[in-house]
């Protein structure tokens, strides 16, 4: 509805709910600001209006209850844009107060943020010009979910696919009608369904500041591509919408979720509550700083101008303050209740385990509140269980439901596959569910999200092609990104046309993924790894909104052999409940079976090389977890020489070759109907390769 009248009558309104709420009489606005002594609500006809059509000054005696400022604007139509201005003391050193009556502020509870006027926004300016701040949008659209509900898939059956909404379809080769958008992603659902994954994990899709980059990076024409710079925690990112100027943020996001659900695919959101786009001292005042700087951020106890930074991004959200904790829970529950998302991955989640002084807490209220929320009770909740200041908590997040990115799994598998010796006991522990991390806390293998690559670091192909990072395109003199890649280039650094090197790299890529998919826990695949996407050695493409950071869809045909292998590997995992157990592999019979759930071997049955410091081989058999599935035998040789393995025997069981990373396609992955029974008592496993047999 166009905003074509005014001024509008105002009434006192009420303090709850926060944000802008459309009611029978108009729109109620409410915002938190504990120490403000005055407030103004600015109303705009559109996101790019040069001036507000009405400024509503709130009366402290009428429009102020406890720590909230509120007003009801009678008959105000949806489609109105708005900002706040707060008056109050400016005492940053003593109290952290940063009130500025001339600065317009975004409502943190805004359901939609519009960026169409951002040609005037410049976060590097010394002070934002009047009326140039981000604006919230009043929404009241109805939506037909057509019976949709969040996906309720048991965690042990989950297979996660991490992708970037913009980068997934922005390449010209994607062939979609609206590249780089939520709607564009819908067109790629058949690909995701055929791949076999169960959930997409979307890198940040809450509204974020694309200008949040160092000055030199911005001047080079680069921008914040990954989106770990949130400021609109209830709003889909308008840059991923086709018509955000029409207020279609929620509809377009919901259309994507509904379409994914119809294909049986769940949606996990990567969320950033550890810091915001406002940065540290000198960063722009966009919302929290101007509403309650001392409430929303961790500040130095002696000089509150100093922001405690445990995130590497300038500030740390004071997540365990009651108001901030409630804000975070409200946001999460909103995305589940109103947007039907199926779970969340929390960026640098350990920062959320700190108190206002930055000290780690034994029982962080916000993390327990997420664990215990009734609304979130069926949602997947995943922690990146560390922060940028050295707090590493893999295995120790509170409660039963918290899953964690298992960085120990990543590092162990990378080292083992590149040929590091003496890792056999450690790699067996990782394959069996990482009991060393989780069992003592009464947790299960399903608390471990197993991965070998993610957005942060080398892609799979680069992991087997580079031993050093090549990040100069980021314009930070190659200082950014980790140097601890645990990678091996297979003998040549970077691009090569040597067919032997290329074949070895392909084999190593298959080895890495095979170990991940035969491990107990929840596997996570990085988008593009299934077709060997490269970033040319850049292990930190956070500012590369260009082909370096995009999914090149021509690889689907060019590396179709790898795509076929990954599809088959995922299908193999789905065939075997023994790979998806809710308990750690113990070597003991389970559920009335006569066979141990796992038996470990070396090159001879029953003799795993636990005490051999030079060993690079391991084998194991998995008993069937159901009567309708096959047993499994896995032979792993990461040695530089081929090894002969004796095949373990199981009564009334014949072994059929299902997978051999040492073979070229299509014999590297054999479908059950094409498998041939093994006729020998031993097999030669090629150097740096894995063989898997199904027993029936």
Image: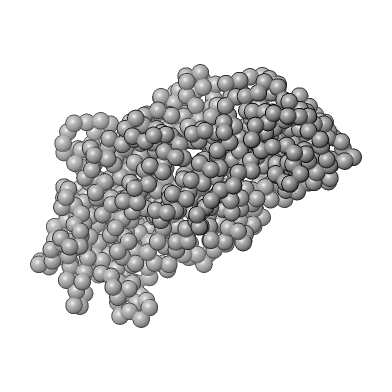
**How far from the left and from the top, in percent, is residue 316?**
63, 40
Horizontal placement of 582 versus 423: left or right? right
**How far from the left and from the top, in percent, is residue 677?**
13, 66
Q: Residue at x 56, y 42 (%)?
A: 250
Q: Residue at x 42, y 62 (%)?
A: 156
Q: Quadrant of residue 491?
A: top left
Residue at far left of view: 679
Q: Quadrant of residue 125?
A: top right
Residue 556 visible in the picture: yes
Q: Nearer the viewer, residue 445 or 41?
A: 41
Horizontal placement of 57 versus 76: left or right? right
Quadrant where the N terminus lies? top right
Q: Nearer the viewer, residue 30 or 499?
A: 30
**How far from the left and from the top, in percent, is residue 157?**
40, 61
**How far from the left and from the top, in percent, is residue 239?**
51, 32
Q: Residue at x 51, y 46 (%)?
A: 254
Q: Residue at x 43, y 29 (%)?
A: 544
């Amino acid at each position: 509805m166009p905003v074509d009248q005014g001024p509008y009558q105002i009434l006192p309104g009420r303090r709850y709910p926060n944000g802008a709420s459309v009611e029978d009489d108009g729109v109620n606005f409410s915002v938190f600001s504990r120490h403000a002594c005055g407030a103004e609500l600015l109303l705009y006809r559109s996101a790019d209006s040069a001036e507000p059509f009405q400024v509503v000054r709130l009366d402290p005696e009428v429009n102020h209850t406890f720590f909230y400022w509120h007003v009801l604007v009678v008959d105000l139509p949806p489609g109105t844009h708005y900002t706040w201005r707060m008056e109050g003391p400016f005492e940053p050193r003593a109290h952290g107060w940063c009130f500025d009556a001339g600065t317009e502020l975004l409502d943190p509870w805004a359901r939609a943020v519009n960026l169409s006027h951002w040609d005037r926004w410049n976060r590097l300016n010394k002070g934002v010009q009047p009326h140039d701040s981000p604006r919230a949008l009043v929404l009241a659209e109805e939506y037909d979910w057509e019976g949709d509900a969040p996906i309720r898939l048991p965690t042990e059956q989950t297979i996660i696919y991490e992708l970037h909404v913009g980068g997934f379809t922005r390449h010209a080769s994607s062939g979609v009608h609206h590249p780089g958008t939520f709607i564009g992603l819908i067109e790629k659902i058949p690909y995701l369904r055929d791949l076999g994954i169960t959930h997409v994990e979307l890198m940040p899709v809450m509204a974020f500041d694309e200008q949040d980059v160092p000055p030199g990076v911005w001047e080079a024409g680069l921008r914040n591509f990954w989106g770990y710079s949130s400021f609109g925690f209830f709003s889909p990112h308008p840059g991923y919408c086709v018509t955000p100027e029409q207020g279609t943020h929620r509809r377009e996001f919901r259309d994507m979720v509904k379409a994914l659900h119809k294909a049986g695919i769940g949606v996990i959101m990567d969320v950033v509550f550890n810091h915001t786009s406002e940065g540290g001292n000198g960063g722009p005042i966009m919302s929290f700083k101007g509403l309650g700087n001392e409430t929303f951020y961790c500040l130095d106890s002696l000089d509150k101008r100093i922001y405690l930074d445990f995130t590497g991004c300038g500030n740390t959200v004071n997540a365990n303050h009651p108001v901030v904790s409630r804000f975070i829970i409200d946001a999460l529950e909103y995305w589940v209740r109103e947007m039907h998302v199926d779970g969340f991955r929390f960026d640098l989640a350990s920062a959320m385990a700190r108190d206002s002084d930055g000290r780690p807490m034994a029982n962080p209220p916000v993390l327990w509140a997420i664990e215990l929320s009734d609304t979130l009770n069926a949602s997947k909740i995943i922690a990146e269980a560390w922060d940028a200041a050295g707090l590493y908590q893999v295995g120790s997040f509170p409660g039963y439901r918290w899953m964690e990115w298992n960085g120990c799994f990543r590092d162990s598998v990378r080292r083992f596959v590149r040929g590091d010796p003496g890792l056999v006991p450690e790699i067996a522990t990782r394959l069996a569910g990482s009991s060393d991390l989780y069992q003592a806390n009464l947790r299960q293998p399903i608390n471990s999200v197993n991965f070998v690559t993610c957005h942060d670091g080398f892609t799979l192909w680069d992991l087997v092609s580079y031993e050093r990072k090549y990040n100069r395109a980021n314009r930070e003199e190659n200082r950014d990104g980790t140097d601890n890649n645990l990678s091996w280039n297979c003998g040549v650094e970077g691009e090569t046309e040597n067919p032997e090197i290329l074949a070895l790299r392909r084999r190593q890529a298959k080895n890495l993924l095979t170990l991940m998919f035969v491990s107990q826990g929840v596997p996570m695949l990085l988008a593009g790894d299934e077709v060997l996407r490269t970033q040319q050695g850049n292990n930190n493409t956070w500012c590369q909104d260009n082909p370096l950071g995009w999914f090149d869809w021509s690889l689907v045909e060019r590396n179709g052999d790898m795509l076929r292998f990954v599809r088959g590997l995922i299908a193999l995992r789905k065939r075997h409940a023994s790979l998806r157990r809710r308990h750690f592999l113990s070597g003991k019979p389970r559920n009335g079976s006569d066979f141990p759930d796992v038996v470990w071997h070396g090159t001879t049955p029953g003799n795993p090389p636990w005490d051999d410091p030079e060993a690079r081989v391991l084998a194991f058999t998995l008993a069937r977890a159901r009567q309708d599935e096959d047993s499994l035998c896995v032979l792993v040789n990461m040695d530089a020489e081929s090894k002969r393995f004796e095949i373990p025997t199981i009564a009334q069981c014949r072994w059929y070759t299902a997978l051999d990373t040492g073979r070229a396609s299509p014999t590297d992955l054999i479908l059950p109907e094409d498998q041939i029974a093994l006729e020998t008592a031993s097999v030669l496993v090629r150097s740096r390769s894995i063989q898997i047999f199904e027993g029936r």
